[in-house]
Amino acid sequence: MYKDKSEVVFSDDASALIQKIIRRYPDGRQKSALLPLLHIAQAEFGGWLSAPVMDKVAEILNIQPIEVYEVASFYSMFNLKPVGRCVIEVCRTGPCWLLGAEDIVKYLEKKLNIKEGQTTADGVFTLKTVECLASCGTAPMMQIGQTYHEHLTCEKVDEVIDHYKNNTEGTISHWSKDKIKA
Amino acid sequence: MSRQLLLEHINTPGIRGIKAFREKGGYSALEKALKTMKPDEVTEEVKKSGLRGRGGAGFPTGMKWSFLAKPEGVPRYLVCNADESEPGTFKDRYLMSHIPHSLVEGMIVSSYALGANTAYIYIRGEMLYVYHILEEAIAEAYEAGFLGKNILGTGYSLDLYVHPGGGAYICGEETALLESLEGKRGNPRIKPPFPAVKGLWQSPTVVNNVETIAAVPHIINMSGDEYAKIGIGKSTGTKLISACGHINKPGVYEIELGVPVEEFLYSDKYCGGIRNGKKLKAVVAGGSSVPILPGEMILKTPTGEPRLMSYESLSEGGFAGGTMLGSGGFIVMDEDTSIVKNLWNFTRFYHHESCGQCSPCREGTGWMEKILHKFMDGHATLKDIDLLWDIQSKIEGKTICPLGDAAAWPVASAIRHFRSEFEDYVRNPEKIKDIKHYYRLNNLQPVS
Ligand SMILES: Cc1cc2nc3c(=O)[nH]c(=O)nc-3n(C[C@H](O)[C@H](O)[C@H](O)COP(=O)(O)O)c2cc1C
Ligand code: SF4
Ligand code: FES
């Protein structure tokens, strides 16, 4: 945990990428880089955005911290509380739900012994439900980091969970760490 | 008979890379447009093609382009809407992840027509892996001299960037998308002014869907007139339909507009019929926002003609008897589907995704969701059906952006066509089992 933004330090690779992204917008429009920066920050700092991390992002973009908070709280991908190393996002919208998404959530809750929105005691898994991920033809499905796990059955869920159980890579983020290294 | 344009080379090995893409004729439209045509001539071809926006509203693309304001000394922007979050829709992700260069080429040709020197592809954040695929494709295009300064020595320059969203359905609405691209919350803007006059950073901007833009190179290659010959009437060209739900063969299909719905649903070439030998109950033909239609009404128009997969035929019968082609998200429900539960799920979705700016949408969607809970909890009365009807009618057309309509139409159509099912929930609540789970799923308390 950071006390304040002065303790928040992006890796060299991330800093370089951030500068590259800021240059994509016209001078004075650097605020546009906010969403990509929040993704990178979430990948760098444990899968969630603490206030010091958001303050750091505000400093980099030369905007007010409130401008970062109001955006981070609007979008569903940003976690404002600590999460497990592996966030499981199960699609709960109509088409997936027609094909059994609800049973998948139930099964995961039982298997991980947590409720939707919670994190396992060992800090490995957080279970989230999310809205349609544009994969309705391969329903039911869930996303972990960059990966779509589709055509889910209980057996398939078992396999996926086993795979991540011994995950030692640290946080599995949407913006993969490989892609931060330029 | 069925023309393949967008997906013709989808199975070619390596088509994600520029080499295979060029071997299949990719980037020929770019050369043709930039070297032999004036920008207005490109727009003219698009007008002639009759191409209509593939994002949902079906607005003629060439006309939209010609509305773009062109004040001296002010930059113009092209922004591609790759936010694809309409439930049931998964065609843009498919196209971008398999043939990313078709979008990149389309962006260059379209930007040239519009006189834009900077363009952005706004892709939903959940698809960050596709973001990286597009970035690779864009890097290849720069390398080949198709992007950057003085493209192919023509004097035209363009920079193209991808921009990720953060998870918000509303950012698919074009003005919310622009707000989001400016680094703000995705609150739709009041129109006018329209983006064509004041869009990204207050500059004239065109926003188009992925599939719309990917169609442009084909129009340039074959000519607008030839493109207009594909399809039927004012529904020209081909359309990607993403089919899902209780069918044997879910997936993305490129159809020539005008294929009979029955053929699309039952032939092995497309959906392959209903799963497990069940009967068809209902179809949501164009993404979750469009009116639901019972099986017999989706197959036939109110005058008894076979219904076709086209803008006009699907909407025949108006609100009472028709629906819309929308985004092409074709959701099929079999005889065992509960329309009420499904509606609850969609309404919950719209409530969750309302940006909260307008009270009819913010309050109305939540209220409708609660009432639908009552049905599922066995506490609803017949009056609640009328109340639902009343609320949806007070949302529709009374909000800043069309999300309000999108939330109202599923409710209105479900009541219109399946009223007896709502009544059944009131009269036989013992039929409804295991619903407590839904409350848990959403951390809600049952409403009594
Ligand atoms: C709530 C809402 C969500 C939308 N989502 C999308 C979307 O995900 N993708 C899209 O292309 N258009 C979406 N649209 C339509 C856009 O506002 C806009 O009309 C479209 O991008 C224009 O492109 P087109 O003319 O090429 O279709 C949405 C509209 C609304 C009201
Ligand atoms: S209709 Fe709903 S989503 Fe659209 S601006 Fe109003 S509150 Fe926001
Ligand atoms: S409904 Fe789950 S991916 Fe679309």
Image (cartoon, coloured by chain):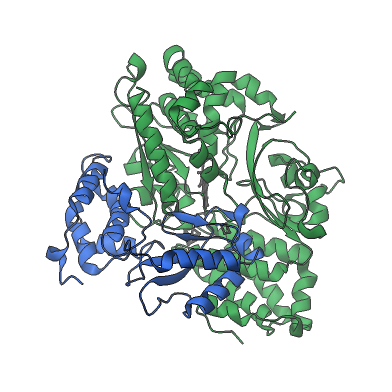
The N terminus of chain B - image quarter: top right
Q: Residue at 74% of width from left, 51% of height from top? A: B322
Q: Which chain is in blue here?
A: A
Residue B209 seen in the figure = no
Q: Which chain is in green here?
A: B
Spot the residue most to the top: B36
Q: Nearer the viewer, residue B197 or A77?
A: A77
How many numbered markers are drawn?
0
Spot the residue most to the bottom: B448
Quick check: B389 above or below A150? Answer: below
Question: Does residue B104 appear left or right of residue A82 in this picture?
Answer: right
Q: Nearer the viewer, residue B63 or A60?
A: A60
x%, y% of residue A120? 40, 77
Q: Residue at 77% of width from left, 69% of height from top? A: B419
Q: Quadrant of residue B281?
A: bottom right
Q: Residue at 66% of width from left, 81% of height from top? A: B434
x%, y% of residue B402? 54, 54
Q: Quadrant of residue B427?
A: bottom right
Quick check: B18 above or below A132? Answer: above
x%, y% of residue A27? 21, 40
x%, y% of residue B407? 59, 61
Quick check: B387 above or below A179? Answer: below
Question: Does residue A139 appear left or right of residue B64 in this picture?
Answer: right
The C terminus of chain B - image quarter: bottom right
Classify the position of ligand 3 by quadrant: top left, top right, bottom left or bottom right: bottom right
Residue B240 seen in the figure = yes
Q: Nearer the viewer, residue A37 or B373?
A: A37
Spot the residue most to the left: A6
Quick check: B392 above or below B8? Answer: below
Question: Does residue B439 appear left or right of residue B196 in this picture?
Answer: right
